[in-house]
Image (tube, rainbow, N blue to C red):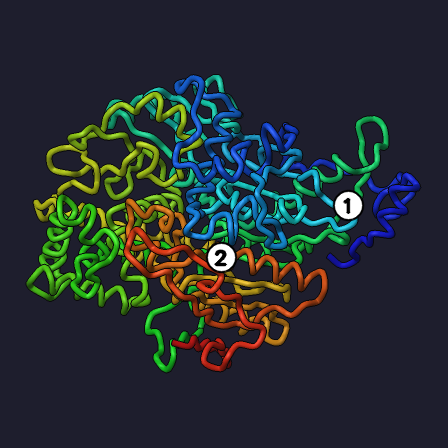
Amino acid sequence: MRFPLTALASALALGLGLTACGSDGNGPVNEKPRFLGVVSSVEYDGVSNDLLSAGLGKTGLQSAVPPSYANALQPTAAELRRAAIYNSYRGLIDTTAAGGYGTLYGPNVTAAGTVTTGEGLIAGGEYTAYSDDGSGLQNVTLVVQVPSTFDRANPCIVTATSSGSRGVYGAISTGEWGLKKGCAVAYTDKGTGSAGHDLATNTVPLIDGTRATVSAAGTGAQFKAPLSASDLQALNASTPNRLAFKHAHSQRNPEKDWGKYTLQAVEFAFYVLNQRLGTDLGGGQRSRVFDPDNTLVIASSVSNGGGAAIAALEQDSNGLIDGLAVAEPAIEMPRNPNVVVKRGSTVQGVNSRTLLDFTTYAHLYAACAALAPELAGSPLQTTYALPTVYGTIAAYRCNSLKTRGLLNATTTSAQASESWQRLRDYGWEPEAGSQLATLASFEVAPAVAVTFANALGRFGVQDHLCGYSFAATAPTWEPTVMSPNALAQMYANGNGVPPSAGVQLVNNQSPKGPTRDLFSTSPSTGLPDMNLDGANCLRNLVTGVDAAAQRVNAGIDETRRNGNLRGKPAVIVHGRSDPLLPVNHTSRPYLALNKAVEGANSQLSYLEVTNAQHFDGFIGLPAVLPGYDSRFVPLHVYLNRALDSVYAKLKNGTALPPSQVVRTTPRGGTAGQAPALTAANVPAPSASPAEADRIVLSGNTVTIPD
């Protein structure tokens, strides 16, 4: 934003019937961007329904009882939207009162931090369209929300690109900050999405989440696998009851365009604002009142959405974005970034690896490492799945790693310790170890590795890359028919990366037939070792030189960032304990890269938060994951503060907090019954951090205090 509107200018414009830019009402015509398909809109009154919570409010979002459907087999678009917002919000946020919901954050907490007794419903208009290239194969969902409190005198837009591989509401908790601030919020699913193409019924999701047959959907499908009729028939015959998902199987490598789609969401927001608030020029035309010269735009989101925001700012040649505030971003570093990362006086030997690189490494070793005696007391290690089924198959993974020459130790305990040390040597911080049992039990590493390997290499569902496929499974773990209810509701309940919403990861090559991957057998070992053969195959796609590996690495090269944030104010917050996107591969080296690229022009501040990890939603599951509540604080608090800081910098010139380690205090107490979080647990970043907390940049080296 270069020439902000003042309240006086806005008042004069409104009083004289002029545009907010001070024109005579016959200014530039608001033109629909070429990439936009049909635009639909709905107005929400903020009483029966709203932008933030789909009418659920603070209480409904907090409730453990999800919203229901009048007909579970045929949910309406409105019902699916409500359930999608409910699940997306809770997937990213701890909604327990003890975790800070309702006091430190949440719908009832105003933009100024005031705690109210209200439900926090936000009235306004919601606009939806595809970014459509005409083929029916791209169809990236875009949504713009304009709250009724949008201030023409202080126009602003905040992006909330979906996290993970979720649908378009996948970063609704980031959008919350913008809506409370009176900003328009620009969402996009960035070419991923939560609902799949069910190949058996040949049905696909539409833009509103309802389902139709491929023929009925035509070019309106949110995603359909690019298969001919004969290929589909052959696939259903050879591997029945499978599903394809957009992120994995679109064959478009969507990650390379996450920045583009985020910028398109901003362009859509400008179009919507001008159609909604611009002067009526007659003939269905409106004047262009709001543009990048007078409207503040902040790119934001979390995880993959945060990475998309960084990509958007790097690619923003048209000057749409004014600042950036992201949390735990996925950042694909350059092939040879030439940066050094130090923690205290210790150089981190491995840094800046790509997501598929460190995820396939985790897929090999994390399940075994979760049994390490050094990690005793970790959530799930002794209280949930591990001592029964999971502990046994994890031990088989340890044994098979030794058999294949990937470990040296000879006992399960020693093999687990060696696996954990290998992960630490490859860039994981010791604070991340306590979550390995959770991630392994939930199959996070294989899920991410399979999806991204398929996407980066542009493999189709018919390729069954490394022998993997997606399907519902029977109690005996073989693929089976997808539940009609689960299929109808997948748009709302799925996260786009199976295992999810009743869809499992399947090992097609298990000796006794296709089996759910977690409980399958490796042909080379003959053991139920969680498919070590598949894990090795995925790892080879990163480290190998065969044709498949070359395809994947070419795709990775299309996604690498360059470190140039164009001198714009930016804040990255990241939890030191993050096990999914380790700080040594993402935010730490990116800070050094940005400084090397921008030099004195850099305005990037990095806040590394102790006792924070990747999944705030896990903190809110004390009955299922006891120990997250007593060990970890919500990173969401710091994303909100980062947004506050960037906004204040852009509006008032207030200095951003310097790069620093923010030292928090865990809630402690009994796992699963931790005392309530207070403001004292989550101190604000300091404007003048102590020397022992200050992150230092020198040349190409970033030094993080212990």
Q: Amino acid at mark 2?
A: Ala
Residue shown at 87%/52% (left/top)? 8
Q: Say which residue label 2 marks.
A: 327
Q: Say which residue label 1 marks.
A: 152
Q: Amino acid at mark 1?
A: Arg
Q: Which mark is residue 91?
A: none
Residue shown at 21%/62% (left/top)? 375
Q: Residues within 10 Å of mark 1 (few under 14, many from 20)?
A: many
User: Where residue 662 appears, x then y in whole percent?
Assistant: 47, 69
User: Where residue 73 appears, x then y in whole percent?
Assistant: 39, 18
Is there any visible trace of residue 544 in the rendered image? no
User: Where residue 309 appears, x then y in whole percent?
Assistant: 55, 53
Residue shown at 42%/52% (left/top)? 99
**Helix, strand or loop status at disc 2:** strand
Of 211 and 525, nearer the camera is 211
Horizontal side of residue 626 vs 643, given as left or right: left
User: Where residue 521 appears, x then y in whole percent?
Assistant: 13, 42
Is there any visible trace of residue 316 in the rendered image? yes
Residue shown at 52%/43% (left/top)? 172
